[in-house]
Amino acid sequence: MRVLVTTAVPAERDAVAAAFADPAATGPAAPGTAERTVPGVVLHRRALPADHRPAAVWDLLAGGVGPAAAAASTAAALTAGALAGEPYDVVVSAGIGGGFAPGAPLGSLVLADAITVADLGAETPDGFAPVTELGFGTVTHRPPESLVREIAAATGALTGTVLTVSTVTGGAERAAELRLRHPRALAEAMEGFGVAEAAAAHGAPVLEIRAVSNPVGPRDRAAWRIGDALAALTAAFGKLAPVLESWNPHDRTH
Ligand SMILES: O=C(O)c1cccc(C(=O)CC[C@H]2O[C@@H](n3cnc4c(=O)[nH]cnc43)[C@H](O)[C@@H]2O)c1
């Protein structure tokens, strides 16, 4: 099983990596860890020995903030893997995110059953029109249902739509507009759709998991609970990893 995890920033990547830390290791890098550079990206590899769990390789990538950086970096890593004859079996977009109240409180985990881009389209006299209504592309990617169910059960994550936005919501009016257009939305972040587009281009299944650091709404950066959210992300990957490693991507049901 080969898993690619894309976060936006190194702090998020390191929070994911902490779930794989070997408690017996004394140095900064646990056994089985390495840094690999492929064109365009640096991957932090966690290679778990076969006697630990089913053999698995986890490559962790801090791919940048926003959907474009996320798509470009994820695509670079996926292409490098494919050309090396080591394609990834699944791609995960992970990090902190804003939660829609009251469904997704601070510190909660949200696992996407739909990854939807919220602001890709056009303003029209009748309001916002998604790009699909203009006859182009897609606005939603759907992770494998069975995998979402199993991971939600293991981690306690809430499941719902995670929106991808290019601009962090900063007011109550915009939050209400998003909620009206996307009643199933539990969280927003800035990378999921970009990661999912890259995964789809490679035919790889995708997941998105967000630890809620702040409410979606009026901007109060000082109130973001980033430390708590990063700790929740580490805990989530500790529980998610064994589920994903035992998942058979060739036997998946949607
Ligand atoms: O300052 C820090 O220590 C720090 C540590 C980890 C992450 C950050 C970020 O600022 C990450 C930016 C990242 O966060 C996502 N995010 C979080 N809340 C929201 C939101 O309300 N709306 C949209 N995106 C959000 C987003 O995916 C950014 O890439 C800082």
Image (spheres, helix red, strand yellow):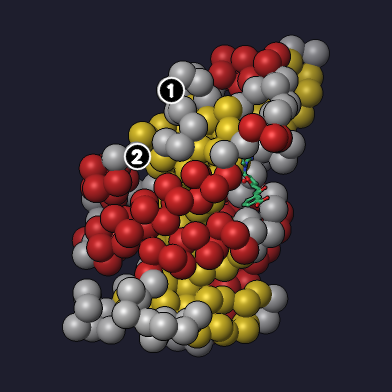
Compared across the picture, whether 216 is left or right of 203 comes to: right
Q: Going from the N terminus, do you reach mark 2 or mark 1 first?
A: 1
- Pinpoint residue 16: horizontal percent, then vertical percent: 46, 61
Pick whichever, 233 or 130, lies toward us: 233
Write the residue at 76% across / 29% down: 122
The amino acid type found where label 2 is placed reads: Ala
The amino acid type found where label 1 is placed reads: Gly
- Pinpoint residue 190: horizontal percent, then vertical percent: 64, 44
Quadrant showing the N terminus:
bottom left
The residue that mark 1 highlights is: 103
Mark linked to residue 157? 2
Q: Residues within 10 Å of mark 2 (few under 14, many from 20)?
A: many
Evaluate whether residue 120 shows in this view: no
Residue 28 vertical position relative to residue 150 in the rendered view, above or below: below
Residue 190 vertical position relative to residue 79 in the rendered view, above or below: above
- Occupied quadrant, residue 239: bottom left
